[in-house]
Amino acid sequence: MAKPRLALLLAVTLATAGGCGSSPKRNFYTLQAPASHAARTAVGDSGQPAIVLGPVTVPDTVDRSQIVVRTSENRLDISDLNRWAEPLRNEIARVLAADLSHNLGGAAVALQGQETAAGEPDLRLAVDVLRFESVLGDSATIEAAWLLRRSSGTPLRGRSSARERVSGPGYEALAAAHARALAKIAQDIAAVTREPGTVSPVGR
């Protein structure tokens, strides 16, 4: 009788140890533009402006796969279990491309390095994200400087910021709020693309 009991005790012990040693599940999040904002990327097509977007840069503090959240004025927490599905700069570029295409009535917006060889685009857009701040259950804030270079004429620069309230307590709601903030940034850039006189020439 002792041997079966010993074997049973050993099996339970090993099972418990195995459960304790399992890794916590990692969650991956993505930024998404509304479905109606799907970007047309074939730069060189006729009828609409052609734009190449890139490079897009982000602050060093958030340039990582882990999602970084602000917990106080002087503290940032890096969540190892909650991550971006792709590099954050790529997430931002993809959403901005879709939002810009939508706001410009179907303009072709290709990411740098993915444009076709159909000809020189009408515009090249570089975006430097200066602030990408996340506060769980509270807000998502984005501030960006951007530079528009036309095929001819003086390059133009601008600066936009947007703050969106988060609709829920988790990381998914936080990602959705950042996507809404990017939509507002894209609206600003689109307005300048249509009316270039609204921003200052580079160097002023």
Image: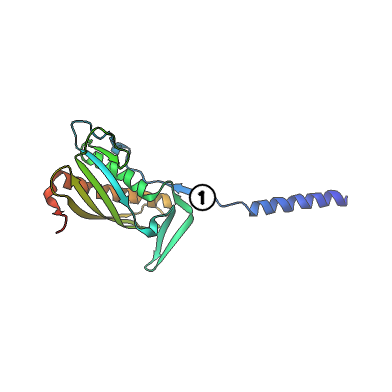
Q: Residue at x 39, y 57 (%)?
A: 62
Q: Residue at x 22, y 34 (%)?
A: 119
Residue 75 makes an appearance in the image = yes
Identify the amino acid type marked 1.
Arg
Crowdedness near tag 1: few (<14), some (14–19) or many (≥20) residues, C-alpha within 10 Å? few
Mark 1, residue position: 26
Residue 148's x, y, as percent? 20, 48
Q: On the image, which quarter does residue 37 sit in?
A: top left
Q: On the image, which quarter does residue 42 sit in?
A: top left
- Camera-nearest residue between 183 and 91: 91
Q: On the image, which quarter does residue 52 sit in?
A: top left
Q: Does residue 152 lie above or below 40 as drawn?
A: below
Q: Quadrant of the C terminus?
A: bottom left
Element under label 1?
A: loop
Q: Residue at x 56, y 52 (%)?
A: 24
Give the farthest residue toward the top: 46
